Amino acid sequence: MATITTSTRDQRLLIIDDDDIFCHVLSRALTRRGYQVSVAHDADQALMLAASEMPTMATLDLKLEQSSGLKLLPGILAASPKCRVVVLTGYSSIATAVEAIKLGAVNYLCKPADADDVLNAFERQEGDPDADLADNPPSVNRITWEHIQKVLQEHDGNISATARALGMHRRTLQRKLQKRPVRR
């Protein structure tokens, strides 16, 4: 588990994501660790909560349903200047990672990410020149998992519609979704 230098009681964390299930799971995990957690599902709600609650930390989904996290990031930082933001995404790319950091994010994580991953991302203040470089590209299983997650998100979590879009039987998709994500 990550350790934050300030008492967790003093830490207000804002989760900005349009995925209800992800928000619920992450919010519950961080609340259990002692953080004061608020959740926003869209840009307007996020800006309102950032201004009224002045969070010390925020997670920001890159691809919100009606908005881009990159476009929202400067507004969050303007509303709550001391807030440290970690961008989370299922649609990672080098270009968006660079832009997020240039716009003021302290880190950039690929989904799926759990509470420990998020807290570790807030803790990392400096780059690591000794970071491990991947010897191999992601496995076929990992790419498959990420593609299923992307299509599932595009269909608002509707398993039947996702199965039709992927050309697979609904039960097969349900079995795949019950498994843990494949590590890279």
Image: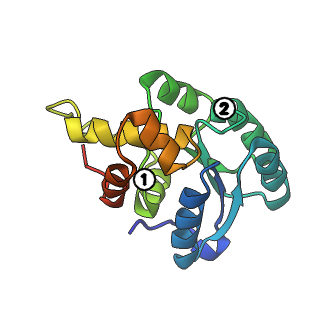
* Mark 1 vs 2: CB contact within 8 A: no
Q: Tell me what residue is drawn at x 48 percent, y 30 percent.
A: 97
On the image, the x and y values in percent for residue 23 come to 59, 59
Query: Under tag 1, what secondary structure?
Result: loop
| Residue at x 66% of width, y 67% of height | 37
Q: Is residue 51 left or right of residue 171?
A: right
Residue 94 position in % (x across, y down): 43, 24
Identify the residue at the far left of this view.
135
Task: Look at the picture and state if 82 lies above or below 10.
Answer: above
Q: Residue at x 77, y 57 (%)?
A: 54
Give the residue at x 66% y 32%. Answer: 68
Q: Is residue 150 among what the camera can see?
A: no
* Figure check: 97 above or below 105: above
The chosen color scheme is: rainbow
The local crowd at label 1, few if under 14, some if 14 to 19, many if 20 or more residues have their Cα within 10 Å, is some
Q: Which mark is residue 113?
A: 1
| Place of residue 156 in the rendered image (x, y in percent of width and height, measured from the top left) | 59, 45
Seen in the image, is 42 located left or right of residue 117? right
- Disc number for residue 68: 2
Mark 1 or mark 2, earlier in chain: 2
Q: Amino acid at mark 1?
A: Ala
Above-or-below relation of 10 to 138 = below
Quadrant of the image occupied by residue 154? top right
Q: Position of residue 147 (x, y in %)?
A: 38, 36
* Image disc number at residue 1: none
| Residue 10 position (above or below residue 180) | below
Looking at numbered disc 2 in the image, what kind of residue is underneath it? Ser
**How many discs mark residues in the rendered view?**
2
> Which quadrant is home to the N terminus?
bottom left
